[in-house]
Image (cartoon, rainbow, N blue to C red):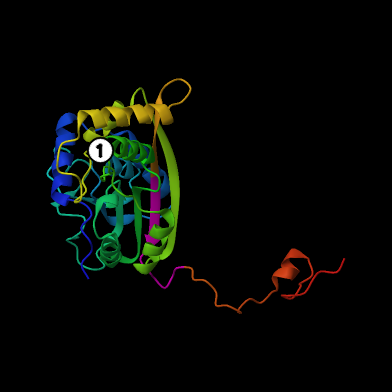
Amino acid sequence: MTAPLIFDRCLLRARRRRGLRLGPQTLLLDRVADEFAHRLSLVLRRFGVAVDLGTPTAAVRTALLRDGAIGAMIAVDPIVARDCAAAATLRVVADEEALPFADHTLDLLVSGLSLQAVNDLPGVLVQIRRALKPDGLFLAALLGGNTLTELRLSFAVAESELEGGVSPRVAPFPDLRDLGTLLQRAGFALPVTDIDRVAVRYATPLGLLRDLRHMGAANPLVERRRVPLRRATLARAMEIYAERFADPDGKVRASFDIIWLSGWSPHESQQKPLQPGSAKKRLADALGTTEIAAGEKPER
């Protein structure tokens, strides 16, 4: 079954190139890179071959290579960028949806703020798990949850008022619980998901739109409206944004939910849950209390 086409991948690459020419906005990527370094520092092992999949800049690679826990770092990116080879032993131009690696060849695969824009995320996760060696680690950060919810609502209200309808202006983002389920279905062991909620403040909503252009993150949807956005609609959306999402000092907020995923390629040495009924001690004994059977009421 072919995955539905939600994102225009060619347009996405073109907008990323434009963002690089304008000068990339790296606020979120720098935050993510530092967190990658912290999380990997807690894993006390060395990774011989690592891949950085689709991260828009070299920030994650640079952060991860500082402590010497990685042997060879391969940068995989769908576009040719000036810093693509920075902090990498090898550079491969390839799309995130078609990994160019044989099964069981990688010790570590990381991805920073890229996988939220693939059309077949379940398929990509399966490819990643297959490419990892047994007991290999997958660690990723992607935008999800309520990311850009303020911008989405502002455009929806403005278009409804002025144009009598709503068109998709902000991409849909995956949910935390859904991503946990996808990790399990892809066959990862010990899957973990968590969320980092970030609020970025701007003097005006136009500052957010400027940063999105520099991130290469302007509307990449296949079903986007193909006519230019009317000036009146844009102005009204910015008014609504400022009215509804401003702090007392007049600055506006933009929400970014960074969802973290981690999972291991299965290996016999990993911890496994016990079978139901295999416990050798009652929970009530461990807690020092009296066990009450289901349906019974405690004595008073």
Residue 13 drawn above or below residue 283: above
The answer to which image quadrant residue 128 occupies is: bottom left
Q: Residue 9 at what x, y percent from top left?
A: 17, 51
The answer to which image quadrant residue 298 occupies is: bottom right
Query: Which residue corresponds to the image point at 31% horizontal and 36% vertical from the top-left?
Result: 161
Residue 128 drawn above or below residue 233: below
Q: Residue 42 at what x, y percent from top left?
A: 45, 50
**On the rendered image, what quadrant is the N terminus found in?**
bottom left
Left or right side of 221 for 27:
right
**On the rendered image, what quadrant is the C terminus found in?**
bottom right
Q: Is residue 210 visible?
A: no
Asked whether residue 264 is drawn in magenta, I would say: yes
- Which contiguous range is marked in magenta? 258-270
Residue placed under numbered mark 1 in the picture: 163
Query: Which residue corresponds to the image point at 48% horizontal and 22% vertical from the top-left?
Result: 248
Front residue of 232 and 20: 232
- In the rendered image, the residue lying farthest to the top is 249
What is the three-letter code of the residue carrying label 1?
Glu
